[in-house]
Amino acid sequence: MARTPRPRPNAASAELARLYDLDLAEDPGDVELYRALARRTGGPIVELAVGTGRVAVPLAADGHDVVGIDLDPAMLARVRARAGAAGPTVAAHLALFERDLVDAADDVGITGAGPYRLAILALNSILLLASAARQRAALDSMARLLAPGGVAVVDAWQPSAADLVAFDGRLSLEWLRTDPETGTEVTKTVAAWYDHIRRLVTLTTIFEEGLPGAPPTRHTRTDALRLISADELTSFAEAAGLAVEQLAGDHDLGPLDAGSERVVLVAGRPRTSG
Ligand SMILES: C[S@@+](CC[C@H](N)C(=O)[O-])C[C@H]1O[C@@H](n2cnc3c(N)ncnc32)[C@H](O)[C@@H]1O
């Protein structure tokens, strides 16, 4: 039987995936956290919302079997390219699924490569699930993918009160960079709005890029980020049957306090649970 062709990412989403990596040229500094957890748990590992493989590819390079899940074929195309550039052994440790992470535990391809020792939801990806119900379902999905004794880790941005006040639609220039892939000069400008009733930050990002002296091309994306408190994250994890090991305030697993800009939850699936 002929194989179904892999859907080709459209040009606009391919550009946005490339610009995602340019944005992350400023290293969030979280990969060592995941490498350390992976050394502790061993594999297999599942990363939900794998993006362009910033975390998954180093884990595969460390010799772990990693499954990456993402909705966006353009992001997954970049994971393949990144893994391929890291060498055939790395690529052989990585399997990718184009899937909604909330449904991942119902996919026999994904469960068939498990059960997993470590499930990762990194770098604010939980906020992209724009309702409490979907965020809760993500924790459920992680718990169901884990083996007894396996560990889930979720990292979510906690904007300060001052940040939220400034999310009133004003435009701010975040950076100007040269993209090493294209040689273009790129600016990133953002505008954010905060809806405190729904705890939703709507973020419009405008990238303008061009070769020096040439008219720029504009790429725009809008994301809705539903903020989640440490308490809510804890209760979603516990409702999913996970036992919270640590609620930290940074990627070094330092304490969570009023000044923390993020919450990092580490939770285990009890060995005795079904
Ligand atoms: C902020 S990026 C994080 C990527 C990667 N984990 C990292 O740390 O660099 C969020 C990713 O989540 C993906 N995503 C958003 N909603 C999703 C969903 N419901 N299911 C699967 N992937 C999703 C997006 O396509 C994007 O690649």
Image (cartoon, grey):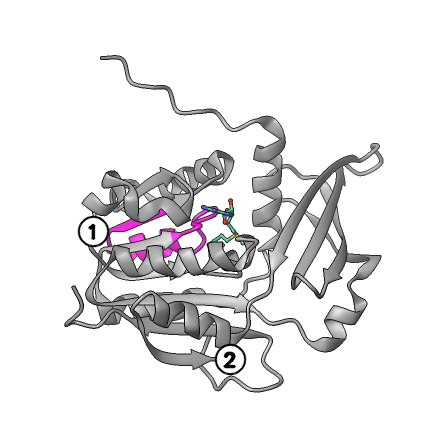
The residue carrying mark 2 has its beta carbon less than 8 Å from ligand 1: no
- Residue bearing mark 2: 249
Q: Decide if residue 32 is in sight here.
A: no
For the residues labelled 2 and 1, the Cα–Cα distance comes to: 29 Å
Q: Could you tell me which secondary element the residue under label 2 belongs to?
A: loop
> Which residue is painted at 73% across and 62% down in the image?
194
Q: Is residue 48 above or below residue 220?
A: below
Q: Is residue 190 above or below residue 237?
A: above
Q: Could you tell me which secondary element the residue under label 1 belongs to?
A: loop
> Which residue is painted at 72% across and 76% down in the image?
161
> Which residue is painted at 66% across and 59% down in the image?
200
Q: Is residue 99 above or below residue 62?
A: above
Q: Nearer the viewer, residue 271 or 4?
A: 271
- Residue bearing mark 1: 114
> Which residue is painted at 44% across and 39% down in the image?
76
Query: What percent of the width, then of the height, locates residue 64?
Result: 24, 56
Q: Which residues are magenta?
A: 48-68
Q: Residue 9 colored magenta?
A: no
